[in-house]
Image (spheres, rainbow, N blue to C red):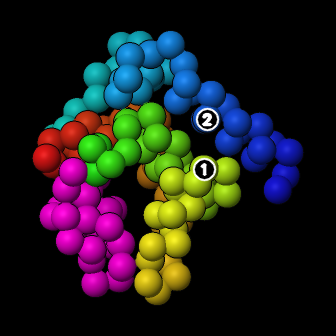
Amino acid sequence: MPIFNMFYIISLLLLSTSAFAEGEVASESPSFQASAERGQKIYASVCIHCHSLTHEVSAVGCPGLQGVVTRHDPDWLNAWLTSPESFAKVDSKAKKVVDANPYGLVMPTLPEMQNEHERLDIIEFLKTLK
């Protein structure tokens, strides 16, 4: 693993242990307000291809998204969405998610999720799926 990636993953892990309130993901832009409505649009254009909005595992073996914020806190989701493959190499919970896919599929690092605001929007939408 290139040294840059290792430092990046470490910084993501440190974010999850920061002084923020549990379940609160900090934005680098203090004026940014995450939107479940924008997050739903991202789901409809990106995530829907592999994930359902129910608890059910999808036809391609991906976990359903209903209740995902009860299984994983928002900081964890933020790190996962940033780079699932890299995160699974350093986080045992992420590794279990990867290993659970019966077809050996791994969520790729998505270009849309490299944008912090889009990640925060999708997490805000996921919070509505109780």
- Horizontally, is 99 left or right of 48 in the view? right
Inspect the image, locate mark 2, and give the three-letter code of the amino acid beneath it.
Leu
Q: Is residue 112 above or below residue 50?
A: above
Q: Looking at the picture, how far across and down is residue 77, in whole percent? A: 42, 44
Q: Is residue 84 above or below residue 14?
A: below
Image quadrant holding the N terminus, namely bottom right
Left-right relation of 38 to 23: left
* Residue that mark 2 sits on: 13
Main SS of residues in magenta: loop
Asked which secondary structure carries label 1, the reply is loop
Point out residue 28 in the picture as x, y percentages from the top left corner. 50, 21
Q: Residues within 10 Å of mark 1 (few under 14, many from 20)?
A: some
| Residue sitting at x 27%, y 74% | 57
For the point 32% across and 67% down, which residue is it? 63
SS state under label 2: helix
| Disc 1 and disc 2 in contact, CB within 8 angstroms | yes
Disc 1 marks a residue whose amino acid type is: Asp
Label for residue 91?
1
Which segment is the magenta one? 39-67
- Above or below residue 121? Residue 19 is above
